[in-house]
Amino acid sequence: MKKGFFMVLIFILALQIAGCGNSNSANGEKDSPKVNLAFSTWVGFAPLYIAEEKGYFKDNGVDVELTRMESSADRTTSLASDRVQGIASTVDSHVVTGANNIPITQVLTLDDSNGGDGIVAKKEIKSLEDLKGKTVGVQTDGGASFFWFLYLLKEEGINVDDINLENMSAGDAGAAFVAGKLDAAVTWEPWLTKAKDTDFGHLLASSDQTPGVIADTIAMKKDFVKENPDAVKGLVKAWYDALDYLESDKEDAVNIMAKAMGQTPEEFEEALKGVQYYDQAKNEEYFGTNDNPGDLHDLTEMGATVWKERGIIKNDPDVEGLLDYSFIK
């Protein structure tokens, strides 16, 4: 009897040790690693909360924690120290991160600004060329607004040094223009509307004229992507599922996103007008392939060139390494 008892005890202990010695779940499948995703408060990221609320992350085999983090510096620091595994931000900001020797790669496009950003100017300023010699409020130490402004000037062959730049955030620039303290401002809503409501201002340029330039993507640590491809695939698929739900039940989807953004459904509906979400088809078009890269590659490359010229970055980032084409399909 004693021998039989001890044999059973040894067998139970062996099972317990085996269970503690690996990360497998009860059904024998490997537990999905946690993906902590950091991003700021922006309408373009709101469908992530649909994925959370509706269980799409879990359904696609990935454990995702959504972390609101408004400071770009805090997000970058958290990524470098592995407190987060991914960041949702603009393409040009990922270029800066990569140039600072933090190995990341973009795996999914979320959205682009579709009229949510713009340049407001005095009515006598009819073109970008007319900005020469004028005072323009824009955040000159980096960021999507400045990148977009430089893109527009480059397209028109205008030297930015011919314009008097006042370094201020997009919100401050909009407020200063409405107060009559600037000739023009690179800003976003609600300042675009407020500027148009003045008797001296108008909308000189809008981001809906440049689709794909102010674009947000998810970039993740390369080592995490390499070690956990299924988790990345699950994250991407959950985003697609969230956009499908937005199409199938817009009212409920808007309620979920509005609550997450701290807005009323009516306020969020208005904000939606300034953004375009990227589903699978648009991601495939925007990314392209290794052999035939799409616009995202060109924008990433331009970000590296522009920020190097402006002294925002000192090193040349690995543009090819900043894109991973394998997860969007």
Image (tube, rainbow, N blue to C red):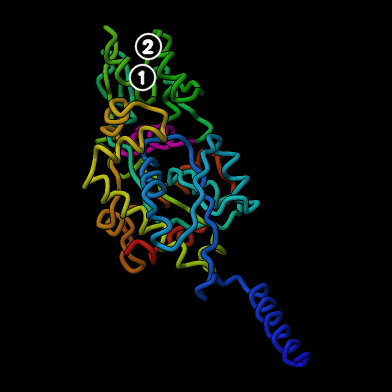
Residue 26 inside the magenta-drawn segment = no
C-beta proximity under 8 Å, tags 1 and 2? yes
Q: Nearer the viewer, mark 1 or mark 2?
A: 1
Q: Please state which of residues 217 and 236 is positioned toward the viewer in this rendering.
A: 236
Q: Which residue is mark 1?
A: 191
Viewed as shown, does residue 237 lie left or right of 139? Answer: left
Q: State which quarter of the image contains the C terminus.
A: bottom left
Residue position marked by numbered label 2 in the rendering:
178
Q: Amino acid at mark 2?
A: Val
What's the residue at 61%, 46% (across, down)?
Answer: 78
Position of the N terminus, as image quadrant, is: bottom right
Sequence order check: which comes first, mark 1 or mark 2?
Answer: 2
Q: Which residues are magenta?
A: 143-159
Q: Residue at x 36, y 45 (%)?
A: 50
Most extreme residue toward the right is 2
Residue 147 part of the magenta segment? yes
Dot 2 alpha-carbon crowd within 10 angstroms: few under 14, some 14 to 19, many 20 or more: many
Question: Which SS class for mark 2?
Answer: helix
Q: Position of residue 38 (x, y in %)?
A: 52, 45
Report the residue at 40% width, 8% height from top: 179
Label 1 sits on a secondary structure element that is: helix
